[in-house]
């Protein structure tokens, strides 16, 4: 019941729409991912126990939806309204994961974006939307984002949004087939009483 109370949800700001990922997204999602394979590969999370086998799209969606039902994740597709198209186009993916309730009230956020749409503020806006939702509607207290030190584009996202650098975590996550260092960034709800989206849009 708790999972049903927090999911599904759709968030909107201007032409940007964050909505639940669905099995029927497979064709469009696969096209976007194939076009961005080289762009995304260096930052792709991997599973050392999978022996190099990649999950299927259906398997990924089922796992994410199960986590959402358990109130442990919010699996969003990032979509953008495009003139001349009847429905918003897939621009990327954003997942709020590792949601912890009780005394922690925290979560971790990860994302990827279509290279053709990078640099236009889509990811900062999406991160701000999701973080505000977690703070204001779900009552979470802390949002964390972990980024490879070499990932300059993602480092710019947290810089723009004012996430606090909490330092280096050596060999923190398995990325593209090996354990990789990450820098951890975080915000707490008290740091953005006006909302992170309002602050971000005002700064643009």
Image (cartoon, rainbow, N blue to C red):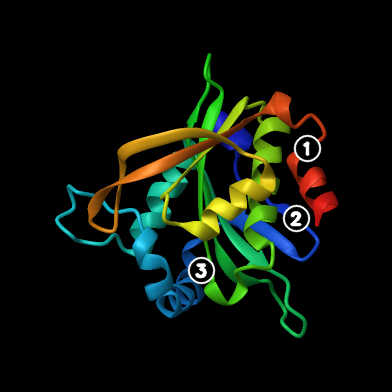
Q: Which residue is mark 1?
A: 195
Residue in the foreground of this view, choosing between 126 and 12: 126
Earlier sequence position, callout 3 versus callout 2: 2
Nearer mark to the viewer, of 3 and 2: 2
Q: Which residue is mark 3?
A: 25
Residue sitting at the far top: 103
200 horizontally vs 73: left or right = right
Please state the horizontal and vertical placement of residue 198, each as a whole percent of the image: 82, 45
Q: Going 75% across and 55% down the picture, which residue do you hit? A: 12
Q: Residue furthest right?
A: 202
Q: Is residue 2 visible?
A: yes
Q: Residues within 10 Å of mark 1 (few under 14, many from 20)?
A: some
Residue at horizontal 53 percent and vertical 16 percent from the top: 102
**Apparent side of residue 102 relative to residue 161 in the rendered image (left or right):** left
146 relative to 30, above or below: above
The residues bearing labels 2 and 1 have C-alpha atoms spaced at a distance of 15 Å
Q: Are marks 3 and 2 in contact (CB under 8 Å)?
A: no
Residue at the extreme bottom: 84
Is residue 143 shown above or below 41?
above
Helix, strand or loop status at disc 1: loop
Q: Residues within 10 Å of mark 2 (few under 14, many from 20)?
A: some
Observer-nearest of 127 and 181: 181
Q: Which residue is mark 2?
A: 12
For image coordinates 62% across by 36% down, the residue present is 6
In this rendering, is residue 142 above or below 198? above
The mark total stands at: 3
Nearest to N terminus: mark 2 or mark 1: 2
Which is nearer the N-term, disc 1 or disc 3?
A: 3
Choose top left, top right, bottom left or bottom right for residue 82.
bottom right
Q: Residue at x 53, y 73 (%)?
A: 115
């Amino acid at each position: 019941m708790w999972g049903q109370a927090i999911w599904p949800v759709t968030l909107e700001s201007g032409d940007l729409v964050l909505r639940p990922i669905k099995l029927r997204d497979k064709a469009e999602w696969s096209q976007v991912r194939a076009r961005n394979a080289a762009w995304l590969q260096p930052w792709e999370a991997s599973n050392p126990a999978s022996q190099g086998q990649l999950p299927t799209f259906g398997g990924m969606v089922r796992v994410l939806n199960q986590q959402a039902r358990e109130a442990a994740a919010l699996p969003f597709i990032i979509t953008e309204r495009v003139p001349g198209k009847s429905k918003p186009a897939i621009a990327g993916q954003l997942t709020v994961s590792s949601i912890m309730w009780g005394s922690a009230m925290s979560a971790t956020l990860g994302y990827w974006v279509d290279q053709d749409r990078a640099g236009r503020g889509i990811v900062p806006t999406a991160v701000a939307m999701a973080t505000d939702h977690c703070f204001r509607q779900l009552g979470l207290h802390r949002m964390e984002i972990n980024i490879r030190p070499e990932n300059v584009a993602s480092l710019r996202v947290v810089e723009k949004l004012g996430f606090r650098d909490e330092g280096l975590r050596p060999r923190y996550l398995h990325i593209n087939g090996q354990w990789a260092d990450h820098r951890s960034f975080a915000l707490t709800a008290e740091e953005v009483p006006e909302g992170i989206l309002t602050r971000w849009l005002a700064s643009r």
